[in-house]
Image (cartoon, coloured by chain):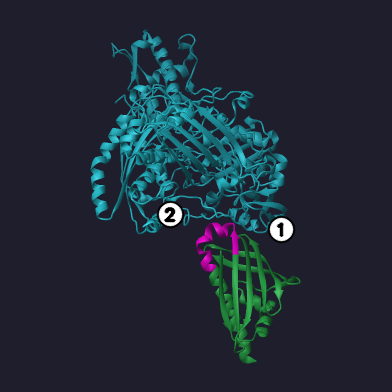
C-alpha cells in the first residue's frame, strides 16, 4: 500500500518545521494517539487505537524520525504491534518554501500490515489509510495556521 | 412389509433430531465438570523468528489458569510423524519460528473464553520477520528463502514415474499440445468449526479427547506418537453430530494434540472451539497446484500419451496425510481415457501459507483441471468437436475391468452410454445452433464438457507411492481399506448397529439401517444406528473414518457383512428349532419361516430370546448372545509394486458433466444457464441421499470454479479472513442442475455400490472453465487458472482486445 500528496501551509518553512518536530503537535494530529513518549533521540513510543472495519484495537507503536535534513525533510517510521496485527509504515515529508512566505509540504508513504487487520480489513485499508493521513495534515494545517493568526 | 430396503429413497433418520434442535455437536457437549476454556494466540507474520515470548502479565490476569507456549510443546511431544523423508519438524505450537499467518504461538486457559481472549492481548511476542515464500514456482527456486533450514530446500517430496513408453508416444505423435495450469488454494467451510475437549488423567497417564474429527484413523497413531502416549491411553470420542467437514475437519488433529498437552500441563479439562476467522486463516485447505501438461495426439484426436509435472504447495509444513493430495488420484491420472503412456513428475513444496490436508475431491479437482482443459484444447487445435474427441478416447464397456498404466483397476463402467445420455440431456447439437444465433446478437454463450473417473474407498497403500520402492521396502507394506461394523440384538429383540465411519452429515445412520433391515427382514425405522465413534469401544481400523467417499463401497459392506453374520446365526438357531436346514429358511417381516411351508415359523424375537435367555438350548457350538462384528476390505487394494503401480482406490465411478454458460463481455461475469451431470456410481444405496451428495459436491465445485480462494499477498499476508472476502456459493448462486444416473454395479463390493459424493467437486471447476473457454472462443484467451471471478475474466478479454488492436 502506498500513496502521496501535498498540502499548502500558510506559514514559513521555519514555522512549519518547528511544528512537525514537536511531539505534542504530532500526537494531537494523529488520530487515536494520546501522547508520544520520548524513548531515545528521535524515537517515541505511543499507544495507537485504530479501527479498520471490524478490527478495532490498540497498537504498541514506535515512531521514529530519521534522515532529518534541517528545515527540508525527514522520514517518519511507524511500527505498531497489537492484538489486531501489525503495521509498518514509512513516510517521507518534504518542505519547500512558497513565494509569499507559505510552505508546500509534500509526502509519500508506504505501509505494510499483517495479521487480522490484513486478513479481514484488507478491502478497507486503502480508504482508512487515506482517511488517517488526510486527517493528520488537516489537523496539522489547522495547528500551523491557528498559531499564525494568534501570533 | 416390503423386504427390499437397499436402493429405496428412504428419508434420513438423522433429520428429525437435526431439524428439531436435538442434534448433539461438540459445542453442546460438557462431558466433565470444571471444564476450562482455551484461546490461541496466532502469528501475524508469515515467516519470522520468535526471539522471546513474555507470558507473565497474561498469567496474572484474573481467571487465567495458565499459558502454554512452543517450548512446553517441544519439551513434552514429538514432532508429528509424516510419510516423507524430508526432515520437517511440525509441532502443534510454533517452536523458534513461525511459518504462516495464523500459526498457533501460545494458548491461554481461563475460566471462560472471554477472559482467555482478553489475556491473549497481554502476551508479548518478539518477532524477527524473515522473507516469505508464497508462490509455488518461487518455492522451487534454489535461492528462495528456506522455511525449514534442516531440509535444505523447500521441497518436501519429489518423485518421477514412467509407465508404458511415453517417449515413443511423443515421438510418434502428430501433434503435441502443452500448457501450464494453476489451481488455486481453497477450502471447504463447514458451518461448524473445529472443536476439542481434552482431559488428561495423571493416575494412568491417559488422555481422553472429544472432537469433531472424522479420521482417517491412521492419524490416531500419529497423535499417539506425537503425544508419547500408549495408543490405548489415547481415547478419542466423536460426537453424534458433526456439522459438516468435506475433509477439512481431518485437520483438527494438531489441535487435539495441543489441547492434550494443555490439559496435561495445567491439570484441567480444557475446551477449545475455533472461531470463523481462525478457521479461514489456519485450519486446513486443499493444495494449490501448478501443472505442466503435454499431450501426445494423433490427427484424429486420439491421445496416446501424457507428460505431467505437478507441484503442490502443502503450506508451511508437510502435515500427514500430505503429500497424499499428489497421489490420491495416481491410479486414475489418465482419467476416463485409454491413454497407455504416461510420464509424471510429482513435487510437494512448502510455502508460507496454512498447511493443507483432506478436502472433498482431494487431488481430483487439481488433476482434472489440466487434464480436461487439455482435452478441450486438443479438439480446438485439431478443429474437432470436443464431444467427438472425448468420445473417441473414452474407455469402452468391453474393456472393463481396465488396468490403467499407473496401476488403477477400474472395476466397472459404461462411460459411452453415460456420455451419450449427457449429450442428449443437455441438447448438445441444438445448443450449437443456439450459440451461433446468440453470437450474431453479440451474446457469448459457451458449453463445456468433462468426463472424470471418481475414485472411492482409498487404499492405505497409495500414500506410500510418495516413497521410492527402495524406501518403501524398509518398512511394513501398506494396503487395504478396512472398515468394521457391529450388529447386535438385545434380549428384547432391539437391533443396534455400531459403525466407525464417523459421518459428518452424509446419512450413514439411514443407509446402515436400510442395509441391516433388508438383511434381517425388519423395518429400517426399528434399527438403531450408533455413529458416535469411540476408539476404545468401536470396531475400527486404521482406514476408518469419513473420507474418500468410502461409506458406499467399504463402510456399507462392513455393515452388510456384520448383518449377514447375525442372519446366519439366527437361521442356524431357527433351523435347529424347526428341524430343518438353514438354506430352507427365509427371513422376512420379523419372522423366519420355511420357504415351502410358511406355517412352520419362528419369530425373530423368540430366536433372539433363545440366544440370550436360554443359551443351553442353542445348537451345539453356538455362542450365546447376538453380537457380531465384521471387517471388510477389498482384495484389489494391494500395496504399490516395484514399478510404482498402485490401485489407489476400491472402486471407480464415472461422472460426465455438461455446462452451458453466458459470459458478459462488459463485466466478465459468468452466468451458468444449465448444469447437467450424469453419474455412474454402481448400485445406489439410497437415491435421495445420493442426489443430495451430488448437489453438495457440485456446490463445492462451483465455489472452486467461480468464487473461492484463500488469497495471500506477495509478502505472505493472508487476505481472505472473513466471508466478506472468502466467497462461498449460497443457495442463490446454485444454477439449475439436472442429475442423471446409470448403474453398472461394482463387481468387487457386495452391494455393487461405489462412492459418489466427490465427483462434481472434481469436475465442476474444469467443466465450467471449459464452458467459459468455449464462450470466449473468438478472443485469444486460454482459461488456465481459477476462480473465474469477473475481474479475472474481464482482464483476459481486455488483454485479448488489446492484442487484436495491436495487430489490426
Q: Which chain is green?
A: A
Give the label on residue A24, or none: none
At x 60%, y 52%, the residue is: B101
Whole-percent x, y for residue B782 in the image: 41, 47
Q: Colour of chain B?
A: cyan
Give the label on residue B792, or none: 2
Can you say which quadrant of the picture contains the C terminus of chain A?
bottom right
Whole-percent x, y for residue B509 in the image: 42, 33
Which chain is mark 1 on?
A: B
Segment tinted magenta in the rendering:
A111-128
Residue placed under numbered mark 1 in the picture: B57
- The correct choice, above or below, for B615 with respect to B77 in the image is above
Q: Quadrant of residue B386?
A: top left
Q: Most prominent secondary structure in the magenta stretch?
A: helix
Q: Earlier in the sequence, mark 1 or mark 2?
A: 1
At x 37%, y 45%, the residue is: B768
Amino acid at each position: 500500500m502506498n500513496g502521496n500528496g501535498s498540502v499548502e501551509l500558510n506559514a514559513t518553512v521555519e514555522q512549519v518545521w518547528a511544528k512537525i518536530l514537536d511531539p505534542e503537535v504530532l500526537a494531537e494530529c494523529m488520530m487515536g494517539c494520546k501522547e508520544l513518549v520520548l524513548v531515545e533521540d528521535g524515537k517515541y513510543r505511543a499507544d495507537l487505537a485504530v479501527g479498520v472495519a471490524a478490527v478495532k484495537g490498540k497498537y504498541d507503536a514506535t515512531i521514529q524520525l530519521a534522515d532529518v535534513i534541517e528545515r527540508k525533510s525527514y522520514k517518519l517510521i511507524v511500527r505498531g504491534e497489537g492484538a489486531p496485527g501489525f503495521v509498518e509504515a514509512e513516510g517521507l515529508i518534504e518542505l519547500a518554501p512558497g513565494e509569499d512566505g507559505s510552505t508546500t509540504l509534500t509526502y509519500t508513504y508506504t505501509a505494510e500490515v499483517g495479521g487480522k487487520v490484513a486478513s479481514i480489513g484488507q478491502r478497507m485499508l486503502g480508504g482508512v489509510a487515506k482517511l488517517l493521513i488526510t486527517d493528520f495534515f488537516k489537523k496539522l494545517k489547522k495547528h500551523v495556521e491557528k498559531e499564525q493568526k494568534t501570533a | 412389509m416390503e423386504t427390499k430396503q437397499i436402493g429405496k429413497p428412504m428419508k434420513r433418520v438423522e433429520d428429525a433430531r437435526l431439524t428439531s434442535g436435538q442434534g448433539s455437536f461438540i459445542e453442546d457437549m460438557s462431558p466433565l465438570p470444571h471444564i476450562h476454556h482455551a484461546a490461541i494466540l496466532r502469528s501475524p507474520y508469515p515467516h519470522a523468528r520468535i526471539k522471546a515470548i513474555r507470558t507473565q502479565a497474561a498469567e496474572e490476569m484474573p481467571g487465567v489458569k495458565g499459558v502454554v507456549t512452543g517450548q512446553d510443546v517441544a519439551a513434552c511431544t514429538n514432532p508429528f510423524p509424516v510419510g516423507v523423508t524430508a526432515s520437517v519438524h511440525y509441532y502443534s505450537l510454533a517452536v523458534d519460528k513461525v511459518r504462516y499467518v495464523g500459526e498457533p504461538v501460545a494458548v491461554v486457559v481461563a475460566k471462560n473464553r472471554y477472559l482467555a481472549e482478553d489475556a491473549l492481548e497481554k502476551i508479548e511476542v518478539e518477532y524477527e520477520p524473515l522473507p516469505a515464500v508464497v508462490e509455488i514456482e518461487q518455492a522451487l527456486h534454489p535461492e528462495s528463502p528456506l522455511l525449514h533450514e534442516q531440509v535444505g530446500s523447500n521441497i518436501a517430496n519429489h518423485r518421477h514415474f514412467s509407465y508404458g513408453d511415453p517417449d515413443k508416444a511423443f515421438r510418434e505423435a502428430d501433434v503435441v499440445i502443452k500448457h501450464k495450469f494453476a489451481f488455486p488454494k481453497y477450502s471447504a467451510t463447514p458451518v461448524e468449526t473445529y472443536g476439542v475437549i481434552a482431559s488428561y488423567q495423571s493416575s494412568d497417564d491417559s488422555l481422553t479427547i472429544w472432537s469433531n474429527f472424522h479420521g482417517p484413523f491412521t492419524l490416531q497413531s500419529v497423535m499417539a506418537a506425537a503425544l508419547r502416549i500408549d495408543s490405548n491411553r489415547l481415547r478419542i470420542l466423536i460426537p453424534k453430530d458433526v456439522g459438516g467437514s468435506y475433509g477439512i475437519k481431518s485437520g483438527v488433529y494438531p489441535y487435539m494434540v495441543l489441547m492434550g498437552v494443555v490439559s496435561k500441563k495445567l491439570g484441567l479439562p480444557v475446551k477449545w472451539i475455533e472461531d470463523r476467522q481462525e478457521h479461514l486463516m489456519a485450519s486446513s485447505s486443499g493444495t494449490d497446484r501448478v501443472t505442466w501438461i503435454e499431450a501426445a495426439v494423433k490427427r484424429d484426436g486420439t491421445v496416446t500419451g501424457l507428460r505431467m509435472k505437478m507441484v503442490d504447495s502443502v503450506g508451511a509444513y508437510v502435515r500427514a496425510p500430505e503429500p497424499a493430495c499428489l497421489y490420491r488420484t495416481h491410479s486414475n491420472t489418465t482419467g476416463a481415457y485409454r491413454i497407455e503412456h504416461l510420464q509424471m513428475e510429482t513435487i510437494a513444496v512448502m510455502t508460507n501459507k496454512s498447511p493443507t490436508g483432506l478436502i472433498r475431491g482431494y487431488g481430483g479437482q487439481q488433476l482434472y483441471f489440466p487434464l480436461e482443459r487439455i482435452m478441450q484444447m486438443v479438439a480446438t487445435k485439431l478443429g474437432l468437436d470436443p464431444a467427438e474427441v472425448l468420445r473417441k478416447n473414452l474407455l469402452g464397456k468391453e474393456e472393463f475391468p481396465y488396468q490403467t498404466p499407473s496401476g488403477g483397476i477400474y472395476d466397472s463402467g459404461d462411460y459411452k452410454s453415460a456420455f451419450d445420455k449427457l449429450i442428449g440431456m443437455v441438447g448438445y447439437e441444438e445448443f450449437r445452433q443456439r450459440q451461433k444465433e446468440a453470437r450474431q446478437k453479440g451474446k457469448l454463450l459457451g458449453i463445456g464438457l468433462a468426463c472424470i473417473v471418481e475414485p472411492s474407498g482409498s487404499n492405505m497403500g497409495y500414500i506410500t507411492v510418495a516413497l521410492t520402492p527402495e524406501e518403501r521396502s524398509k518398512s511394513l507394506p501398506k494396503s487395504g481399506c478396512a472398515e468394521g461394523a457391529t450388529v447386535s440384538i438385545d434380549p428384547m429383540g432391539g437391533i443396534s448397529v455400531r459403525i466407525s465411519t464417523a459421518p459428518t452429515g452424509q446419512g450413514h445412520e439411514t443407509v446402515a439401517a436400510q442395509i441391516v433391515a433388508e438383511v434381517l427382514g425388519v423395518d429400517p425405522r426399528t434399527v438403531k444406528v450408533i455413529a458416535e465413534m469411540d476408539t476404545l469401544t468401536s470396531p475400527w481400523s486404521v482406514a476408518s473414518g469419513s473420507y474418500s467417499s468410502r461409506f458406499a463401497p467399504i463402510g456399507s459392506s462392513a455393515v452388510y457383512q456384520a448383518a449377514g453374520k447375525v442372519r446366519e446365526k439366527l437361521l442356524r438357531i431357527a433351523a435347529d428349532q424347526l428341524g430343518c436346514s438353514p438354506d430352507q429358511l427365509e427371513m422376512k417381516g420379523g419372522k423366519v419361516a420355511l420357504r415351502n411351508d410358511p406355517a412352520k415359523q419362528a419369530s425373530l424375537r423368540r430366536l433372539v430370546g433363545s440366544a440370550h435367555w436360554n443359551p443351553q438350548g442353542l445348537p451345539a457350538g453356538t455362542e450365546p448372545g447376538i453380537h457380531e462384528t465384521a471387517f471388510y476390505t477389498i482384495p484389489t487394494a494391494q500395496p504399490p509394486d516395484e514399478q510404482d503401480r498402485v490401485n489407489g482406490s476400491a472402486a471407480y465411478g464415472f461422472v460426465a458433466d455438461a455446462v452451458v454458460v453466458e459470459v458478459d463481455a462488459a463485466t466478465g461475469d459468468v452466468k451458468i444457464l444449465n448444469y447437467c451431470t450424469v453419474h455412474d456410481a454402481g448400485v445406489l444405496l439410497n437415491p435421495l441421499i445420493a442426489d443430495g451428495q451430488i448437489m453438495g459436491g457440485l456446490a463445492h465445485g462451483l465455489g472452486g470454479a467461480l468464487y473461492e480462494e484463500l488469497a495471500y499477498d506477495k509478502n505472505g499476508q493472508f487476505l481472505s479472513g472473513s466471508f466478506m472476502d472468502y466467497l462461498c456459493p449460497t443457495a442463490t448462486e446454485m444454477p439449475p442442475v439436472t442429475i442423471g444416473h446409470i448403474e453398472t454395479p461394482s463387481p468387487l463390493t457386495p452391494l455393487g455400490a461405489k462412492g459418489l459424493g466427490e465427483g462434481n467437486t472434481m469436475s465442476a471447476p474444469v467443466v465450467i472453465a471449459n464452458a467459459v473457454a468455449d464462450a470466449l472462443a473468438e478472443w485469444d484467451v486460454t482459461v488456465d487458472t481459477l476462480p473465474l471471478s469477473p475481474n479475472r475474466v474481464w482482464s483476459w478479454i481486455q488483454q485479448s482486445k488489446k492484442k487484436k488492436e495491436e495487430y489490426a
